[in-house]
């Protein structure tokens, strides 16, 4: 089992902290990597760490995520090249919703270890 700590309500309108949450969620869904790639990620994990609506926005509206396949009932998605650029630009402060590496790291730690307002959520490994 893998356990993450889900933050409360997703920010609307999106702030630097909200974008940091999004980018941190991608890092964790890729295995807590230091550098984002187009590696496979579980949509159910992203739905918890971000929100289903935010994941849908990245997937359907912006095409920053793409559906790869399903494993049982779990959809597998990955960042597109445009999604990777959006994350990189945000962290560099050069996007519509800029953030900082420090905020992303703080959000990663909160979602890994828990913090005020975070709820634990466990995920069973996929049987591929």
Image (cartoon, rainbow, N blue to C red):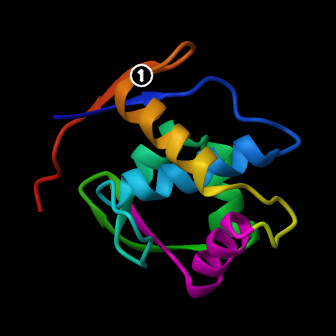
Which quadrant of the figure has residue 99? bottom right
**79 or 53, which is in the foreground?**
79
Instruction: Establish if 2 lies above or below 43.
Output: above
Q: Secondary structure at mark 1?
A: loop
Q: Position of residue 122 (x, y in %)?
A: 28, 29
Q: Is residue 123 left or right of residue 125?
A: right
Mark 1: few/some/many CA within 10 Å (<14, 14-19, 20+): some
Residue found at x 71% / y 43%? 18
Residue found at x 57% / y 86%? 81
Instruction: Establish if 36 lies above or below 108.
Output: below
Q: Is residue 19 magenta?
A: no
Residue carrying label 1: 114
Residue found at x 42% / y 79%? 38
Judged from this view, the residue extending furthest toward the left is: 127
Which quadrant of the figure has residue 12? top right
Judged from this view, the residue extending furthest toward the front is: 102
Q: Which residues are magenta?
A: 76-92
Judged from this view, the residue extending furthest toward the bottom is: 81
Q: Main secondary structure of the magenta part?
A: helix
Residue found at x 71% / y 59%? 57
Image quadrant in which the C terminus is located: bottom left
Q: Is residue 117 left or right of residue 128?
A: right
Q: Position of residue 49 (x, y in %)?
A: 51, 39
Q: Is residue 53 left or right of residue 7?
A: right
**64 or 20, which is in the foreground?**
20
């Amino acid at each position: 089992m893998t356990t993450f700590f889900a933050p409360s309500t997703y920010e609307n309108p999106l702030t630097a902290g909200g974008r940091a949450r999004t980018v941190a969620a991608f890092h964790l869904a890729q295995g807590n990597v230091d550098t984002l790639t187009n590696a496979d990620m579980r949509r159910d994990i992203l739905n918890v760490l971000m929100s289903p609506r935010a994941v849908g926005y990245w997937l359907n509206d912006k095409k920053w995520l793409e559906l790869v396949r399903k494993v049982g009932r779990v959809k597998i998605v990955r960042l597109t090249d445009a999604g990777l650029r959006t994350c990189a630009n945000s962290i560099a402060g050069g996007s519509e919703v800029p953030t900082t590496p420090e905020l992303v790291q703080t959000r990663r730690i909160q979602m890994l270890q828990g913090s005020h307002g975070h709820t634990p959520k466990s995920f069973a490994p996929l049987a591929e």
